[in-house]
Image (spheres, helix red, strand yellow):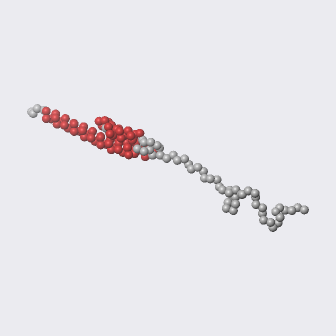
Amino acid sequence: MSQSWPPPGAPPVPPPWPPPASVGPSAPWPPPYPAPYPPPYYGRASGTNGLAIASLVLGILTLGGIGSLLAIIFGHVARSQVRRSGQSGSGLALAGLILGYVGLAVTLLLVILALTSAASLQVQQQPPI
C-alpha cells in the first residue's frame, strides 16, 4: 500500500526555509536586469582658449598697432573656436577684440595726426615768394 504525501485534505507542508524575496505572490517571475550604465558624459572641453588669452594680452599691449591687429585676428579666431569646441574664453576674446579695435583706431588717429602736423610744419617753414 502506498500513501501519498501529504495525505489528501491536509494543508501543504511549508519548506523549512523562507522563499527568496523575488518569489511569491508579488513577483511571479524574477526581476528584470538592472538598467545599464548611462553613456559617458564628455561635457565641455576643459580650459580657456589660448587664442582668447593672447587676444586680450595683445589688446592691452597694442605694441604700436601690430599688437592691436594681432588682437583682432586672434579674437575672431578664438571666438569661432570657443563656439565650436565649447571651451571657455568667449568673454576674453570679446574683450581682446574691443581693445584691439580701440587700439587700432587710436594708432591710426595718431598716425593721421602726426602726418597732418608734419605737413603743416613744412608749409609754415617755406619762405614766402
- Front residue of 42/112: it is 42
Q: Who's the residue at 64% across and 53% down the image? A: 33
Q: Name the residue furthest front.
A: 16
Residue visible at 70% across and 56% down?
20
Q: Is residue 61 shown above or below 26?
A: above
Q: Is residue 19 above or below residue 72?
A: below
Q: Is residue 4 above or below residue 34?
A: below
Asked whether 13 or 37 is in front, the reply is 13
User: Is residue 129 visible to us here?
Assistant: yes
Indicate the quadrant containing the N terminus: top left, top right, bottom left or bottom right.
bottom right
Residue in the image at 22% along x and 39% along y: 113
Q: Position of residue 99 (x, y in %)?
A: 32, 42
The answer to which quarter of the image holds residue 112 is top left
Residue 129 at x, y = what percent?
9, 33
Residue 74 seen: no
Extreme residue in the left direction: 129
Pinpoint residue 74: horizontal percent, then vertical percent. 38, 40
- The quadrant in which residue 18 appears is bottom right
Q: Looking at the picture, how far across and down is residue 28, in whole percent? A: 69, 60
